[in-house]
Image: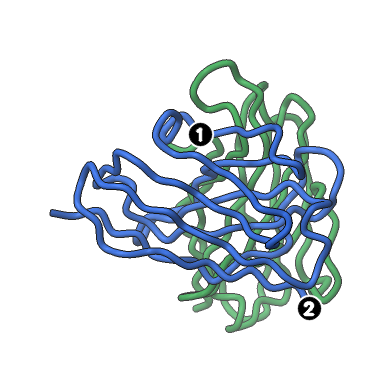
Chain colours: A blue, B green
Amino acid sequence: EVQLVESGGVVVQPGGSLRLSCAASGFTFDDYTMHWVRQAPGKGLEWVSLISWDGGSTYYADSVKGRFTISRDNSKNSLYLQMNSLRTEDTALYYCAKPLYSSGWYHPFDYWGQGTLVTVSS
Amino acid sequence: QSVLTQPPSVSGAPGQRVTISCTGSSSNIGAGYDVHWYQQLPGTAPKLLIYGNSNRPSGVPDRFSGSKSGTSASLAITGLQAEDEADYYCQSYDSSLSGSRGWVFGGGTKLTVL
């Protein structure tokens, strides 16, 4: 059974830093690109970042580019999101998500974690 | 402002048919990128409902169907049930050179079963 379990969400002050983790199981992790998607309270879904299966390619939404860094450790079946220079508008539930297929870029997400809440507030 | 435009809300009585539209542009849906749909029940993670414009994952009832034409897509739900009350999101990819490039979602549509 595929499982994605996020952790690391806390309350942090504006300008602060945070590292989110996502532990994956139930599938061959290093076959798949992986994504982070966020959802602000009461709002819609926003794609945040993608990392290729080997970590060699990364992409970011403009809203987080230059502040967030996605990474992965295939030996630990884990995905990470380093978040720096946090802003109040980064407050959201952060999900890691697995694409439906292991090859190609534009696939939907067939598995999501339960999310971890990041609150940026003074 | 979402790159993909959905109506904020739709409603229908049990047993009825409702549709949810998703309007994009020439840099996303109109460029040939597939549209996918998600259902999000209150307090839960999104669930893939339709992928590749019109395909249903295993376990999704055939009451749910999707279509795509030009720069738009639609999700249709027939035989509405109380358990269908949820938020629905469309998703695609945007190839614009502007800030919207990447995996994009609609703003979401809240379905109310009357």
Q: Residue B107, percent across and down?
A: 48, 48
In-image side of A15 versus B21 (left or right): left
- What residue type is disc 2 on? Glu
Query: Label 1, on which residue?
Result: A61
- What residue type is disc 1 on? Ala
Query: Label 2, on which residue?
Result: A1
**Do callouts 2 and 1 mark residues in contact (Cβ within 8 Å)?**
no
> Between residues B30 and B69, which one lies in front from this camera angle?
B30
Give the SS element for disc 2: loop
| Mark 1 chain | A
Q: Is residue A58 above or below residue A109?
A: above
Q: Residue B113, percent across and down?
A: 53, 76
Dividing the picture into quadrants, the one containing residue A1 is: bottom right
Determine the residue located farthest toward the top in the rendered image: B97
- Which callout, 2 or 1, points to the residue nearer the camera? 2
- Name which residue lies at 41% across and 33% down: A63
